Image (spheres, helix red, strand yellow):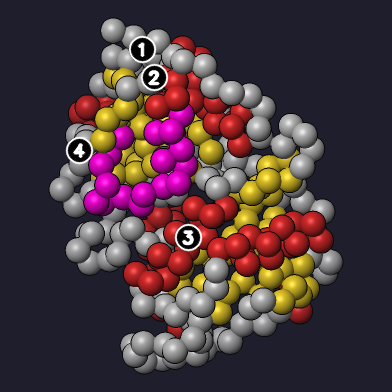
């Protein structure tokens, strides 16, 4: 599904066959979830070129995540982007998902490492949550305490929480989960940020207990260009339940509408929502199709 005998990856500055690559089974990342990663997408543009979307932002966040977890990081973003384009070319991929991973050496102690390793893998992937509107469940799991983890880092170990929440939702017949933070406010999905629409305005949870998503930041940019009001604040579950519409956003998920929360449908049809406008604008942005036009907010 992800690779075959002819798939290439970037491994510590070299291009190698994925099937021939090796990792130390004593790696601290494998045993303790002590590593950092990114999710990036490339797109076939309107002019048929391949373009990595916000590559600098993603690789800079990878570096910041590594520093937050005390993982040595000796690479520069331009070097890694060039390596990623080479891997995409060799694998004959344009619309692709890109996964850089910084992982630790063999170390069964909790002492600081003096080296790290990096791998960049690519594969073809449709939107992570599909393209149909989602039926979402409020999870029994919470996002980790921000004082217990470096929440701003995209760390491998954090995603055990995401996996458990998503599996719980799917086992109960839902498409995805929505997690609250330890104070009971709306946080995010297992792998995406959340926005709600209320009276012509978008609202999203403030930073502090969520991953500061790059797609989330892109939604802010689109809103600014289209004159769509957007606010960051703490959102109660009741506020979310009373919203006109809602959507998740993330590199893997892109922009995907939510049909219902806990089997209660949102009031506004998705086609009439601000989220639908954002969804189209985002797709046009990442594929280089067109400029933005101003949107008149609803009073």
Q: Which residue is mark 2?
A: 227
Tell me what residue is drawn at x 22 percent, y 66 percent: 148
Which of the 4 image quadrants contains residue 135?
Answer: top left
In primary-sequence order, the first of circles 4 and 2 is 2
Q: Tell me which label, 4 or 1, sits earlier in the chain.
A: 4
Q: Measure how far apart labels 4 and 2 are at the Cα level.
A: 22 Å
Instruction: Give the residue pinned by disc 3.
Output: 60
Q: Where does label 4 land, which residue?
A: 234
Exactly how many numbered labels are in the figure?
Answer: 4
Q: Secondary structure at mark 4?
A: loop
Viewed as shown, does residue 251 lie left or right of 91?
left
* Number of the label disc, if any, that sits on residue 57: none
Q: Are marks 2 and 3 in contact (CB under 8 Å)?
A: no
| First of labels 3, 1 by sequence position | 3
Say which residue label 1 marks: 297
Percent position of residue 150, x then y: 30, 64
Marks 2 and 3 sit apart, C-alpha to C-alpha, by 28 Å
Q: Secondary structure at mark 3?
A: helix
Q: Is residue 177 above or below residue 47?
A: below
Of the residues under marks 3 and 4, which one precedes in the sequence?
3
Dividing the image into 4 quarters, which one contains the N terminus? bottom right
Residue 173 visible in rendering: no
Task: For residue 93, say whether it is visible.
Answer: yes
Report if the CB atoms under discs 1 and 2 are less than 8 Å apart: yes
Q: Which mark is first along the chain, 2 or 1?
A: 2
Residue drawn at x 82%, y 69% is 5
């Amino acid at each position: 599904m992800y690779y075959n005998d002819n798939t290439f990856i970037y491994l510590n500055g070299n291009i190698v066959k994925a099937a021939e690559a090796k990792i130390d089974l004593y790696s601290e990342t494998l045993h303790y979830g002590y590593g950092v990663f990114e999710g990036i997408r490339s797109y076939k543009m309107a002019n048929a070129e391949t373009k990595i979307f916000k590559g600098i932002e993603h690789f800079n966040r990878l570096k910041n995540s590594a520093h937050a977890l005390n993982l040595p990081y000796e690479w520069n973003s331009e070097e890694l982007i060039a390596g990623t384009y080479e891997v995409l070319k060799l694998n004959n991929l344009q619309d692709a998902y890109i996964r850089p991973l910084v992982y630790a050496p063999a170390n069964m102690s909790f002492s600081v490492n003096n080296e790290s390793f990096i791998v960049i893998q690519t594969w073809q992937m449709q939107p992570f949550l599909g393209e149909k509107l989602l039926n979402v469940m409020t999870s029994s799991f919470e996002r980790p305490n921000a004082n217990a983890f470096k929440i701003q880092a995209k760390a491998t170990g954090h995603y055990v929480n995401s996996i458990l929440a998503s599996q719980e939702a799917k086992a109960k017949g839902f498409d995805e989960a929505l997690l609250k933070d330890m104070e009971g406010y709306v946080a995010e999905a297992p792998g995406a940020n959340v926005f709600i629409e209320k009276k012509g305005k978008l609202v999203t949870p403030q930073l502090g207990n969520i991953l500061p998503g790059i797609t989330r930041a892109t939604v802010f940019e689109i809103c600014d260009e289209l004159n769509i009001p957007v606010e960051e604040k703490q959102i109660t579950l009741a506020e979310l339940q009373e919203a006109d519409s809602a959507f998740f956003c993330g590199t893997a998920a892109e922009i995907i509408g939510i049909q219902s929360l806990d089997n209660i449908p949102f009031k506004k049809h998705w086609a009439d929502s601000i989220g639908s406008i954002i969804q189209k604008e985002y797709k046009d942005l990442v594929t280089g199709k067109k400029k933005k036009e101003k949107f008149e907010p609803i009073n």
